[in-house]
Image (cartoon, rainbow, N blue to C red):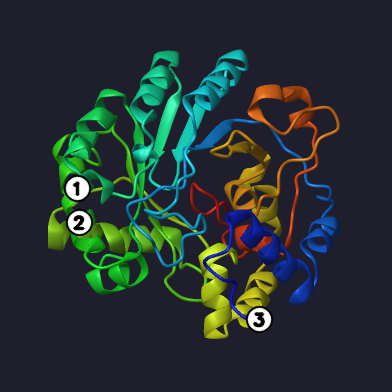
Amino acid sequence: MASLAKQQHPLARSEAQINFLEKDCFIGPSFKEKLAEQGLFPLKPTEIEIFQMNLGKMCNQTCRHCHVDAGPDRKEIMTQETMLQCLDQIKSHGLKVVDLTGGAPEMNPYFRWLVEELSSLGVHIIVRCNLTIILANPKFHDLPQFFKTNNIEVISSLPHFTAVRTNAQRGSQVFEKSIQALKLLNKVGYGREPTYLLNLVYNPSGAFLPGDQLALEKEFKTRLKSTYDVDFNQLFTITNLPISRYLDYLQQSGNYEAYMENLIATYNPTAAKNVMCRNTLSIGWDGYLYDCDFNQMLDMKIVTNNSGTHISNIDFKSLQSRNIRIGQHCFGCTAGAGSSCGGATT
């Protein structure tokens, strides 16, 4: 099947990718069948603990495997009105963890206002910072201190501890700029003082699963410290899911079938019990709700009997009892040691 055109409208692209994943190139048993074998279908939430807000698809980078399809040309941005609706739900239901993502979430004009509002509520704030944004423009140069002031946990992607492999995946000079940004974060205490958490994310650059998370963390810490005097807390390994730009790559390189067969063959029942969609609610830039960030990129909105699908009209009781929407791409979260926005799940 020909590669999906990058010029498509995002919604049209999502529909085309779902069609490809579920109909045109169906490989092996369905994810539904694998869940049913262990009594997990329909997949249900455990408890909504994490509110993950996508603040927009605008980004200063255009990474090769970005599942969000983010980039400088994207205009989708969460409005302050939608943020206020999210804040109302966070306050009403006493949610304690809010995960801010993008694109580059810092490029949203209301980013700092939102962070300060969340900080006043006493919630634990996670920001998924691509590192290079800190150097992209003088108005972002103070982000390390802003993060520290608001006690933010910073999670940043660094595909490898070498320039060649990182730049191949994320763009020219990204590694060098990332190291500069990590040094600035270290300077204010991130990765060096217990209170200020700096965690890195590793995802493979090719059509294979990530290695052992603890072994990779040890290697990353040793190499980054000895070569660049950079410190961080934890390394999270994330499996690339076959959607968006990564699906394009799999198709263009002729690796799609082999990759899906590998995901299915390494299905881990324990990882299936711990998938992030069971304790996380994903909110799109426009306020619509999804079971996870990956379903969001495929425009697979949540389905409930009594709740709306937008942050402005949700019923938490119904959300807690909903059936989570699944597809073949979900095998990416249950392969090997499992995968989530917080790394391996087993």
Tell me, yes or no, if residue 122 can be seen here: yes
Q: Disc 2, disc 1: CB below 8 Å?
A: yes
Q: In this view, does 214 lie to the left or right of 346?
A: left
Task: Judge whether 125 appears above or below 231 on screen.
Answer: above
Spatial CA distance of label 2 from label 3 is: 35 Å
Residue 257: numbered disc: 3
Q: Within 10 angstroms of label 3, few (less than 14), some, or many (20 or more) residues? A: some
Q: Dot 1, how many residues are within 10 Å of its Cα: few (below 14), some (14-19), or many (20+)?
A: some
| Rendered residue at 83%/47% (across/down) | 42
Q: What element carries label 3?
A: helix
The picture places residue 233, in percent across and down from the top left corner, at 31, 45
Residue 24 image label:
none
Residue 102, how many percent across, how many down?
Answer: 45, 45
Asked if the residues shown at circle 1 and circle 3 are in contact, with their CB atoms under 8 angstroms apart, the answer is no
Residue extending farthest bottom: 254
In depth, the one of 39 and 157 nearer the eye is: 157
The picture quadrant where one finds residue 167 is bottom left
Residue ID for mark 2: 177
Which residue is disc 1 drawn over?
A: 135
